[in-house]
Image: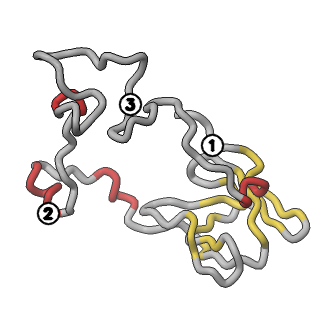
Amino acid sequence: TGTLLHNIEMQPGKGGQMVRSAGMAAQIVAQEGDYVLLRLPSGETRRVLSKCMATIGQVGNMEHQGIKLGKAGRSRWLGIRPSVRGTAMTPRDHPHGGGEGRSPIGMPGPKTPWGKPALGYKTRKPKSSDRLIVKRRGRK
């Protein structure tokens, strides 16, 4: 317990799927039967089969999050496109679009470009692996 891990398999032999981002690490909380209890960087506590492989330690490149790109062009080199507000679009491109000048959204709450409610709307579909989650991640 207390060991830091990264690149964790979810099913034995499938290859690492969890905790692979720069500077991240999961912590072993407990061991119960065939399962190991892990605290993930998101705050979620989850059971993983003890047969699953993982790499001991923390992922490198911890400064990755602190890098300032400095200009729009450098973002473009990385393939990051500009973020355009929905209100600046036409109604055919976004539910918030159209109107004269700076118009309100014009509906009870904000929507995604595909018309689904934004902010606080649950979008996660139930999965068979849900039974392995002991504690869900906290709200931001």
> In which quadrant is the N terminus drawn?
bottom right
Classify residue 33 by image quadrant.
Answer: bottom right
**Number of residues whose C-alpha sits closer than 10 Å to that of mark 3, classed few (under 14), some (14–19) or many (20 or more):** some
Give the amino acid type for the residue marked by disc 2 in the picture: Trp
Residues at marks 1 and 3, CA–CA distance in whole angstroms: 24 Å
Residue, disc 2: 77
Element at label 3? loop
* Badge number at residue 137: 1
Residue in front for this viewpoint, 92 or 80: 92
- Whether residue 1 sits left or right of residue 7 in the image: it is right
**Number of residues whose C-alpha sits closer than 10 Å to that of mark 1, classed few (under 14), some (14–19) or many (20 or more):** some
Residue in front for this viewpoint, 109 or 82: 109
Give the amino acid type for the residue marked by disc 1 in the picture: Arg
Say whether disc 1 or disc 2 marks the residue closer to the N-terminus: 2
- Whether residue 121 sits left or right of residue 45 in the image: it is left
**Number of residues whose C-alpha sits closer than 10 Å to that of mark 2, classed few (under 14), some (14–19) or many (20 or more):** few
Residue, disc 3: 111
Say whether disc 3 or disc 2 marks the residue closer to the N-terminus: 2
Q: Which of the two discs, 3 and 2, sits closer to the camera?
A: 3
Residues at marks 1 and 2, CA–CA distance in whole angstroms: 33 Å
x and y percent of residue 43 in the render? Answer: 62, 46
Residue in front for this viewpoint, 59 or 46: 46
x and y percent of residue 73 in the render? Answer: 8, 55
Classify residue 18 by image quadrant.
Answer: bottom right
Give the amino acid type for the residue marked by disc 3 in the picture: Lys
x and y percent of residue 17 in the render? Answer: 56, 70
* Badge number at residue 126: none
Q: Is residue 97 above or below residue 100?
A: below
